[in-house]
Structure formats: structure tokens, C-alpha cells
Amino acid sequence: MSGSDETSTGVRQLIALVTGSVSAMDIHRGDRRVEDLRMDSLEMADLLVTIEERFDVVITADALAGARTVAELEATVRRLQCVAG
């Protein structure tokens, strides 16, 4: 599995873990975190910390807020991994 695939799978698994209400298999790239996945502010904060720990990156609240879809969040994490790595 490529690094990009691992990031995509990992982000979806973390969203599923944080929400507890949706399976990683049911999360799609075009899903919006708030509108489609119904994530609240507490889940967003938990996701931020979880992403930082899992991918060894530092993600700002603004960067997380700017990534409205799952695909945008995956791209943000990949970009941060390149900067960190």
C-alpha cells in the first residue's frame, strides 16, 4: 500500500474512531465532515489530536477547519507529512 493510500485509510479510520457512529468503509472522499458526517466541535478537536498523534504531524485548528471534505483533510495530512518528513 502506498503512503497516500495509507494516509487515506488512516484518516477515514480516525474519523470513524472519533465519531463512533460511522464505519470507515462508509466514509467517502467527498463527504463533508460537518454536513455529511455530522461531526461536532468536540469530535473535531479530538480528531485534530488523534491525527497529530497517528501521523506525527502538527495540524492547526485553522488547517483542520479549512479541510471541509475527507479528501481535503487527507491532502492536508499528506502535505504536513511531506513538510515534517
Image: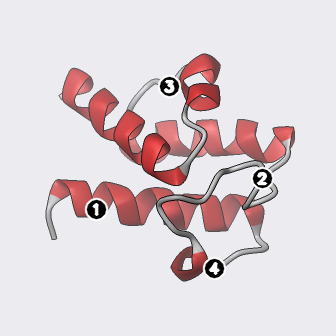
Q: Which residue is mark 3?
A: 59
For marks 1 and 4 on the same chain, the one whose residue lies earlier in the sequence = 1
Left or right of residue 81: residue 70: right
Label 1, residues with CA under 10 Å away: few <14, some 14-19, many ≥20: few
Residue shown at 79% from the left, 73% from the top: 21
- Residue 35 on image: x %, y %: 77, 52
Which kind of residue does numbered mark 1 sit on? Glu
Residue shown at 75% from the left, 62% from the top: 19
The circle on residue 35 is 2
Of the pair 28 and 79, the residue shown nearer to us: 28
Left or right of residue 49: residue 43: right
Residue shown at 44% from the left, 50% from the top: 71
- Residue 80 on image: x %, y %: 33, 28
Q: Which residue is mark 1?
A: 6
- In terms of image quadrants, where is residue 5? bottom left
Which kind of residue does numbered mark 2 sit on? Glu
Measured in 3D between alpha carbons, the distance from the residue under mark 1 to the one under mark 3, in whole angstroms, is 18 Å
The circle on residue 78 is none
